[in-house]
Image (cartoon, grey):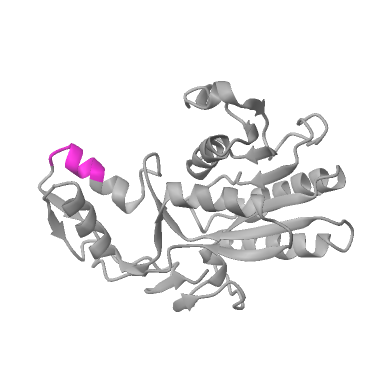
Amino acid sequence: MKILITGATGFVGRYVVEEALRQGHSVIALARNKAKAKSFSWFEKVSFLEFDIEKDEACIQLMGNPDAVIHLAWSGLPNYRSLHHLEINLPSSMRFIRSIISGGIKNLLVTGTCFEFGMQNGALSPNMPTLPDNSYGIAKDTLRKWIEKLHDEYEFTHQWIRIFYVYGEGQSDKSILSKLKQALDKSETVFNMSGGEQIRDYSPIETVASKIIGYIQNSEHSATRHCCNGNPISIRNLVENYLKENGKNIELNLGYYPYPDYEPLAFWGIE
């Protein structure tokens, strides 16, 4: 299968490209920074397309007529409250998706977010009502509903994949494990964090990439799915497990930071 992957140089995108190649697919990697793309080992194995979703006009024929599209591109993270998600990302994605669907794409996968559920606590299933309350969640939820309405005009199969929490090499330096690693690398003796009681759903990035490729390969019907672990874990246990697995020690200064007010205290996914 020939797969076009947008956001190819992002944290999730770089692993999805690698997994698609590993499974024998032909990849068209789309991103706006060619120099960054060249830093990845897969660069010479893909057809690279320098393209900015927010500015450039899409033409599926000029993009190599792929069999399927995985749309991951989304800028402005991790500032979840920024209006950039509604004013820039949402209309840009709408314009891009309409263009490729009208151009003949029949197999589309777009990633969503657990933030579509807003402040709902507990186990979250794919068919639960969404109640987003930050700009990022609202923009993603609106895009999902718009794609569903796009079926009124075009015949295609789409999969909406809500990603929960992800960890791995190359993730944002603002993530909890990245900050922990930075503190350890600097030989700091104390790690400042929240109380650590938040319950979350974490998956390794390699697992997320494998699932995404699996979904695009088995797309006979449109569906909304959760890409999650399903095994809730507290932030404190996540940090303690990382230290144990890596043979490291550092004092945890629990309660130094307040709990974030843009997400509930305890939630996890059900596939």
- Which is more toward the observer, 83 or 14? 14
Q: Is residue 264 visible?
A: no
Q: Is residue 61 visible?
A: yes
**Range drawn in magenta:** 181-187
Q: Residue 98 location in percent, x, y?
A: 81, 49
Residue 184 highlighted magenta (yes or no): yes
Q: Quadrant of residue 29?
A: top right
Q: Residue at the spot x=11%, y=50% of the render?
A: 249
Q: Quadrant of residue 100?
A: top right
- Which is more toward the observer, 144 or 260? 144
Q: Quadrant of residue 219?
A: bottom right
In the rendered structure, the answer to whether residue 179 lies left or right of residue 249 reads right
Residue 69 position (above or below residue 202): above
Residue 42 position (above or below residue 97): above
Q: Residue at the spot x=20%, y=55% of the render?
A: 192
Q: Residue 34 location in percent, x, y?
A: 58, 24
- Which is more toward the observer, 87 or 33? 33
In the rendered structure, the answer to whether residue 222 lies left or right of residue 33 reads right
Q: Residue 217 location in percent, x, y?
A: 65, 50
Q: Residue furthest front?
A: 24
Q: Residue furthest right?
A: 153
Q: Residue at the spot x=55%, y=24% of the render?
A: 43
Where the N terminus falls, by quadrant? top right
Q: Residue 182 location in percent, x, y?
A: 24, 41
Residue 271 position (above or below residue 2): below
In the rendered structure, the answer to whether residue 216 lies left or right of residue 248 reads right
Q: Residue at the spot x=43%, y=63% of the render?
A: 229
User: Secondary structure of the magenta portion, mostly?
Assistant: helix
Residue 208 position (above or below residue 141): above
Residue 108 highlighted magenta (yes or no): no
